[in-house]
Image (cartoon, grey):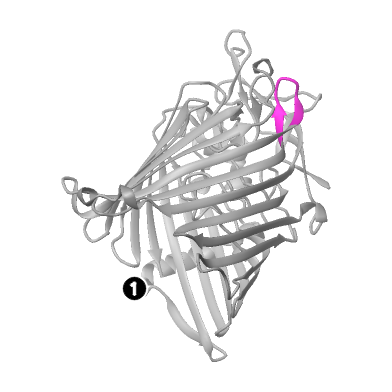
Amino acid sequence: MRKRFCIQRKGFGIFRLVAVLSAIALYFAGPASAIDTELWGKPLSLTGIVKQGVSYGIAGDQYDTKKGVQSLLTQVILEAKYEPNPDVSCFLTGKYNADQAYPVLSDNHEWRNKQFNKSRTQRYLLDDWQDILGEAHITVKKGDFYLRVGKQVVAWGETDGFRLMDQINPLDQRRGITDVEFENSIIPVWLIRAEYRPPTRPEWMQDLNYQFIFNPNPQFRGNQNILPGNDTAGIWAPRSDIPLGGPYPFDYAHLGSLAGTIEQPDNFSPEGFTYAGRITANIWDSRISLNGYYGRSLDFVYRNTPLGPIFATSPLDGRTILSPVVEGYYPYFKYVGATFSRDISFLKASALGGVSPVLRVETLYAFNSTFVDNVNNQFVKHDEFRGAVGMDWKIKVPLLNPKAYFSISPQIANQRIMNYPGSSIGPIVGSSLSEGYMTGLYENNWTSTLMISTSYMHTKLQPSFFWLRDWTNHSEFFRYQLIWEHSSVWKYTLGALVVRYSKDGVGLQPLMDKDHIYFNVACRF
């Protein structure tokens, strides 16, 4: 094992050439959505996306956020697909991700007093090679065999808006939680993926498939979560006021960034290997899977050290900033699980559009998961159960949309901690379904989501609504979004994110000041 300081990574350089290329792509973008050519006489396809966004804070003048323009995110994704023969394909993506608010607001008085300028190293340009190189893999399909080797994404599970069983790829939330669908925030990792479809099977079973995943750990990477400290996380730093009990400026202190060490496996160390397997099949019109996972958790756990916090003074209001000195590690995470999905035909109603809803079920049982007992400042281990039930239903509401369906997807999820200590111990902390910072976990933890969407004008106009509620910690967020897909090239997105809470220090409360409006323009070429 090796130790690394938390959130102190620095980039290797600034690739301004990519920004120039993105501007050229925007200028010359036409109706074509791809470049099809040949390499050594074989087909090569090149595509790309350039996206420029702006975020406008509406939470007011708070310590942990900036009112008005607070983010100017530029993203460029370049993709290449090459097929040297019918059985082999190669796929490569490169990414450029920069928040132009850092150079634009570098001289802004509010920006500097809140110390957002100090997070520039971590948040301006994501120029680590792991961030620049997206997917990079070779796929071989031969008969009933399938093999993919390289940096890739493997998605498991049946849930939307949060991840339950899907633990193979880490998640990147350094830019916040606006993108609840996760498509652009899942981090590809180096994997070997092998699958086999038996040619013979019982008559009552179709599409039987065996899948095996191995991560050789060439470079360990966990979830890139929202962490404390304006000087580390920028505008997404969570808010946590620490009561001091004195007069101003000693009435309360601000929570600063974490100091100390987090252990993680060395490169190619067997301690960082991940093994995962899945069996899927269609049985009597139901899609069923059996899953197993053994490897490191994607979330680290930490506890305070006897050294105590590091003290600093905020240039904004003169209050104290307390940076905890912690120690932690990425514990092992082991589970067995299953998924189930099926059309519920008896609920099909012609008055609602005549479409059967789809029932989705996902469960897992994890062994010896690691949590933190905050009262005793100790790592503790408990088995845990996680389960979720969801439904996808397309219905017609002619009064609101005479031509297209409404897609309605409710979900309810439970996380149960086995052999949970008595209530006198207080909430333990660990990975949770709602993925909120400092989330308190109790014996039973309930989360629900609701997604509603439809489309108008031949799918060009796409309004949607997403709601996530942490019932245990009495917090929630709402996302309202409107997409205008002008053509196969241009796409415009307008949205708003609103966070609400009623309990301090847990759930989504530390994100209480993150309400914002966002607007994105995307160009595909």
Q: Quadrant of residue 214?
A: bottom right
In the rendered view, tell whether residue 313 sits above or below residue 133: above
**Residue 371 on the magenta segment:** yes
Q: Amino acid at mark 1?
A: Gly
User: To which quarter of the image does residue 342 belong?
Assistant: bottom left
Task: Count up the numbered dots.
Answer: 1
Q: Residue at x 38, y 52 (%)?
A: 520
**Residue 302 vertical placement versus 179 (above, below):** above
Q: Is residue 120 magenta?
A: no
Density class for disc 1 (Cα within 10 Å; few <14, some 14-19, many ≥20) is: some
Which secondary structure type mostly characterizes the magenta part of the structure?
strand
Q: Residue at x 45, y 82 (%)?
A: 36
Report the side of 77 relative to 167 (left or right). Answer: left
The x, y position of residue 198, in whole percent, is 60, 72
State which quarter of the image contains the C terminus: bottom left
Query: In front: 72, or 368?
Result: 368
Give the farthest residue toward the right. 1
The quarter holding residue 28 reads: bottom left
Whether residue 170 sits left or right of residue 521 in the image: it is right
> Residue 293's spot in the image, x, y percent?
68, 52
Give 510 or 386, whichever is nearer the viewer.
Answer: 386
> Which residue is label 1 attached to?
30
**Along the line of sight, the residue nearer the viewer: 76 or 211:** 211
Q: Is there any visible trace of residue 13 in the rendered image?
A: no
Going by the image, does 496 lie left or right of 317? left
Residue 72, position as x, y percentages in the image: 45, 48
Direction bottom: furthest residue: 41
Q: Residue at x 77, y 27 (%)?
A: 378
Find numbered disc 1 in the image and state the secondary structure of the residue it sits on: loop
Residue 354 at least partly seen? yes
> Which region of the structure is painted magenta?
370-380
Residue 67 left/right relative to 5: left
